[in-house]
Amino acid sequence: MSLLNIASDGLPNVLMQLHATVLRARRPIPRDELLEAVAPTAVVHDDGDKARQTLNRWTRLGLFLDDAGVIDVAERPDDRLRTPHDMLAFTRRQACARVLAPENNPDFWAPQGTLAADLTRGLAWMLAQDVYRTGFDDIEERESQQIADPDRWLLRNGTRKPGLQFWSRFLGFSRQPYADIDPTVAVRDVLPQVIAEGEDMPVAQFVDRLAAVLPVIDDGVWRREMLTSVDMNILGGLTQGQLSTALSRALLNLRLAGDIHLTVRSDLGSAIVLTGANGARNDLTFHWIARPKAGDSR
């Protein structure tokens, strides 16, 4: 089935409750007990179908483990999750990693989207767009213009767009209102995997590392695969070192928030150029990136 088909494969809020319930329990939970806790049959109107479908799908994706009907999470945090925000962030990071994992995208172009492929495909295409001129209101029209083969269209009918809206926002690749494509949260989530506190490096190296962890962004494996079917004359290409508007937006937001520092190094030849609403910004050319230590105010 299609992960973007929210009628049959679940919703982010249901996933969040399932995952949080097992995390809070700090132990595996019998399947029926978990489903009853999240979707009490005396309260829900669908006999618990949505919770059951969501649990089934995300067990197949590897977020949950099912040992003879006893459910556990595949990974638990190293530190205690003290607030609902911490719980949400942990679940979001784990779910994003499972969506983008190679084993959950075995047939990237499967029409019905095997495992997570339809969502991965949608994210890769969405993040390649000009975020200043593309929103979910016109996303179907743009897809049909850019991809000549209708068998490779993602949003072939109206049932998949809400799924892309809901999941992209939950995973940190868009924000309210839904028209705003913005991967800032997703990039912030993986910063510790890409660059340690107090570490610095050439920003081109940082982007390569980031693409390995979030392969739907610039030069990631799923982005490259998606672009093989896109008419670049219509989408518009990027010059050497130029970042997409989506990734540029994320890095600028993280820079403004103090999560990263971007600087110019005259002794380095390799640079990245951020892209704004009117194209490449030569005044936003950087060679070096640093992630400050907690409390560093420089």
Image: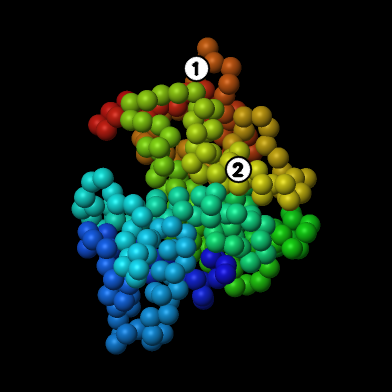
Q: Residue at x 58, y 30 (%)?
A: 273
Q: In the rendered view, tell whether residue 293 sits above or below residue 182.
A: above
Can you identify the residue that label 2 sits on? 221
Location of residue 77 in the rendering, given as x and y in whole percent from the top left corner: 28, 49
**Which mark's residue is nearer the viewer, 2 or 1?**
2
Query: Which residue is painted at 32% across and 61% down in the image?
Result: 72
The residue at the point 41 percent across, 69 percent down is: 55
For the residue carrying disc 1, how many other residues have a C-alpha within 10 Å: few (<14), some (14-19), or many (20+)? Answer: few
Quadrant for the C terminus, please.
Answer: top left
Q: In the displayed structure, does residue 136 sit left or right of residue 53?
A: right
Q: Which residue is mark 1?
A: 265
Please identify the quarter of the rendering in which residue 246 is found.
top right
Report whether 262 appears left or right of 153. left
Asked if the residues shown at circle 2 and circle 1 are in contact, with their CB atoms under 8 angstroms apart, the answer is: no
Extreme front residue here? 68
Q: How far from the left and from the top, in percent, is residue 59?
A: 43, 63
Task: Out of 63 and 274, give the one closest to the viewer.
Answer: 63
